[in-house]
Amino acid sequence: MADVAQRAGVSVSTVSRTLRGLSTVSDTTRARVEAAARELSFAITRSASSLVTGRTGRVAVLLPHLESWFLSATLSGMAPALREAGLDLLVYSVADVRERADFFDRLPARRNADALLVVSFALTPAERARLDDLGMPLVFVSQHAEGRPSVYVDDADAALRGTRHLINLGHRRIAFLQTSDETGFAWSSKNRLAGHLRALADAGLERDDALIMSVPGWKGSGMGAAVGRLLSLQEPPTALFAETDDFAFRLLAALREANVPVPGRVSVMGFDDHVMAGVLGLTTLAQPAADIGRTAVHLARSVIDDVDGAHERHIVLPTELVPRGSTAPPPAGS
Amino acid sequence: MADVAQRAGVSVSTVSRTLRGLSTVSDTTRARVEAAARELSFAITRSASSLVTGRTGRVAVLLPHLESWFLSATLSGMAPALREAGLDLLVYSVADVRERADFFDRLPARRNADALLVVSFALTPAERARLDDLGMPLVFVSQHAEGRPSVYVDDADAALRGTRHLINLGHRRIAFLQTSDETGFAWSSKNRLAGHLRALADAGLERDDALIMSVPGWKGSGMGAAVGRLLSLQEPPTALFAETDDFAFRLLAALREANVPVPGRVSVMGFDDHVMAGVLGLTTLAQPAADIGRTAVHLARSVIDDVDGAHERHIVLPTELVPRGSTAPPPAGS
DNA sequence: GGATCTTCTGGCAACGCTGTCATCGCCTTT
DNA sequence: AAAGGCGATGACAGCGTTGCCAGAAGATCC
């Protein structure tokens, strides 16, 4: 910055003021400084300004991993919003328990970001407490959190509408498949199941726990076994509701392998509206992942700037049922 | 840090030494300091140390976007390697031309990261020059770059083997489909096509430009049209080689819509080994995305630490043909 | 027992910026 | 014409660390 000052023939103070866009700089000086900065392709050292202002110009995002469509899409939505605000994006992805413990132990985000966005994270009370101790703005994304701003969809309501759609098609035996994976979408998961059950109850259908399946792992092969168990029930389901599209895809593959026609014999419904859902013709509940990301960033900015009421705002974004080819009325006589 | 020092009854210098793990601290003092730091759950302000040491403890990654499987998987591979090195991950995703221009204009990574990893980025000479001016360690990922360390796979060789596989199955008319999308995989793309053509030439097959298709957009609907054009040729192809799996999936969807059986009438081959490739039974060339990410980080660390020879190391990782159900011998009589 | 090492610790400047205050012209007001 | 106000700029301290040097205390050697 001193170089720029010298080249422009002004003091560093003036350069600082110019570059920050403060109004008290004359037009001619501003032009000179900007020219000098450009010629030297000067980029500010954020470390130094952070030290003085206490702002880092960075927002940290904590994610359970990076490989699901939903998380990537959410992150994608954040990127432009952050850029617009001149904020950099710091990503903490904690894939396993060790990394997770390490994150909450060392809290590396502390003092290294202006806000922490916690995405789709099923927190233990201890972890939640640790974050609260962090003393930095927190925004919960894709989950509701008491006492903190959050952005999410109404998973229960969406699932309710999904199941209702299946019921309207004539289905009476509807299975719900969820991942038993620990990390990840536990908050959403619980709510989706609740919505599903609610729809069944509303329609006067009896709950049957044999139709609620926890299938292990993201990548495992438990899916085939699960399908086998469901289809060998005395009264097998005519529709399968998977808690995410990623999951529904694996389900479709398992069904294809077992030569079960979709939707001829069973209907399949997903949740997310993954890009591939369109390609594969999967009926699903679209959730606006990019919007969620963008909104989360806006919310974070409000909290950082200490806007009134921002500290406990809960924004619920809409979901939409997208009917495609994987759902149809149940086969006659079932 | 002053608080910790006071609580431990030592000077800040000693606290600093202890926390950095320097050896010249007595065991008793070290224990006292560590206890104090833990009790106050002290976290160091990186900004301040950056200012002194010139190290930021951060690595920046520049990506064309965040939504392809390959990029997510690569990023996933980087995360644990960075964590292990105590480095934070700064993500710059530039989705459109405006953002891209902005990045190269302002170079926000400058002085805000210890190294920049450039992933799958088809750079203009001007952009490349701009990066070189940046005066910071650069690592090119998923692309070869003259004069800079890089990690990539031999796309040409992989594609060659893919096409050879199709030829070995008996195919003689093989189409190659690439995206005409600007951002993204231009480097890989060019090489994959070259490898494909090489395999044709090696087998004594004539090149037919009608079989090389550029299909627009990531998400558009140009795929149906492309399939139509190919299948209405006088001598239609019996095999289709898509430059990425993402692309192959859309191709599969278009073929299904057109009622063209795969692999009955045409075989389809992809590139990447996307998670869904297994699910959909797509034959593909697996590239070790996570390994690429991890290796890139190791390389970056070597360059940062100025290890001998690191500045121009080129690491080529292996690819593997994964035969699945989407490829088979051509239908009899074609 | 004094000189010389060694091991450990403290003091202090410096990193590159920002915020505050002081200063300097020039314009307006009476 | 003097007083006051205002807009633009510069000087300087200080943010929380680290690196360097000095120094204290204890160990070793002749």
Image (spheres, coloured by chain):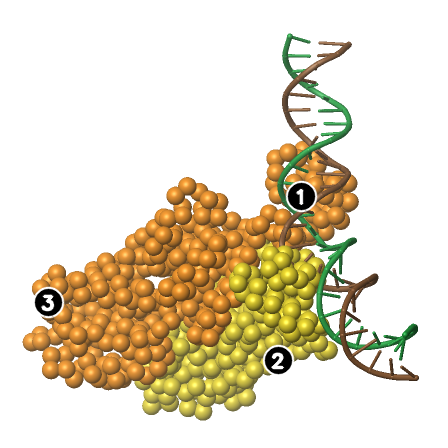
Chain colours: A orange, B yellow, C green, D brown
Q: Name the residue rendered at 68%, 57% in the picture.
A: B51
Q: Which mark is residue B315?
A: 2
The answer for how far apart the CA atoms under marks 2 and 1 are is 43 Å
Q: Report the front residue among A313 and A165.
A: A313
Same chain for the residues under marks 1 and 3 in the image = yes
Q: Report the front residue among A261 and B304.
A: B304
Which callout, 3 or 2, points to the residue nearer the camera?
3
In the image, residue A219 lies at what x, y percent?
37, 79
State yes or no: discs 1 and 3 in contact (Cβ < 8 Å). no
Query: Which mark sits nearer the N-terminus, 1 or 3?
Result: 1
In the image, residue A84 lies at what x, y percent?
51, 50
Q: Chain of mark 2?
A: B
The answer for how far apart the CA atoms under marks 1 and 3 are is 68 Å
In the image, residue B104 lies at what x, y percent?
61, 56
Dot 3: element: loop
Reading the image, the residue beneath label 3 is A205
Dot 1: element: helix
The N terminus of chain B, quarter of image: bottom right
B127 versus D5 height, above or below: below
Which callout, 2 or 1, points to the residue nearer the camera?
1
Same chain for the residues under marks 3 and 2 in the image = no
Q: Tell me the amino acid under the disc marked 1.
A: Ser
The answer for how far apart the CA atoms under marks 3 and 2 are is 60 Å
Q: Is residue B112 visible?
A: no
